[in-house]
Amino acid sequence: MSSEFSAGPVLTHTSLREYFHGELSEALHNQQISAEHETIHYLTNLLTVFTRSEALFEPTDNGVDIKPLALTYGEALNENSALERTRLLQKLGDTALFIAGVFSDSLKTKLVDVDYYIAMGGSAYSSLSDAMRGYRAVSRAAFLFEELTHKFTDFVDVLNEVSESARASQDRDILRLYEVWLKTGSRRAEALLRREGIEPLTDSRPGTRH
């Protein structure tokens, strides 16, 4: 897991957090995406936490693996405890955002693609925002998850840039970029296609970006 972010000397937990904060700020600036301070802090923590494999992988019947999002969603729906339901929905949203942002290239060989993770993660964050709205003690958290909901695809793009920068990869899979743009409306994928001299056709997408 940590190899996904290997770049030079091993980073300490403190410097790793600082590294991700800097990379996120730069990626947000490069893509002209605005984000509240709390949201940037949240994304920084998300990246830092998921560098530990136990935060993403867990024992299953098929060995250590990532728990399917649909199972976590089902558990959240059937949970009577509001606190535990909130924890499960947050885990679902965080996992979906991390996988879509960091492992989007590997998803093309899976049964579900990046658009599935975007839909599941956005829905989980939306449910969290709705549940917290109206409770004064967690009103700031409601706004945080609302921003994560509405800008989920943008933040996937941001995490993708951070991950790509950390891997120092210069390879471009043009067909994959076009596929991601068609499915999600990713502004970053669109910009990278144009950088490669390819002009995406808006009317070729099945839907429009909200």
Image (cartoon, grey):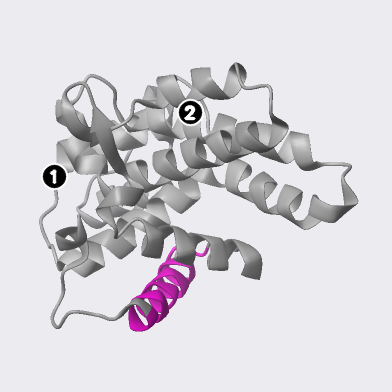
Residue found 47% across the figure and 45% down from its top = 94
Looking at the rendered structure, the kind of residue marked 1 is Asp
Q: Which residue is mark 1?
A: 173
Write down the residue under mark 2.
120
Q: x, y (%) of residue 23?
A: 37, 73
Against 144, is 41 above or below?
A: below
Position of residue 92 measured from the top left corner of the image (x, y, whole percent): 48, 35
Q: Is residue 28 above or below residue 17?
A: above
Q: Earlier along the polypeptide chain: callout 1 or callout 2?
A: 2
Of all residues shown, which one is farthest toward the left?
171
Residue 30, position in %: x, y? Answer: 42, 69
Front-most of 74 and 165? 74
Identify the magenta region. Answer: 14-32
Q: Are marks 1 and 2 in contact (CB under 8 Å)?
A: no
Residue 196 visible at all: yes
Q: Quadrant of residue 69?
A: top left
Q: Does residue 24 show up magenta in the picture?
A: yes
Query: What SS does tag 1 mark?
Result: loop
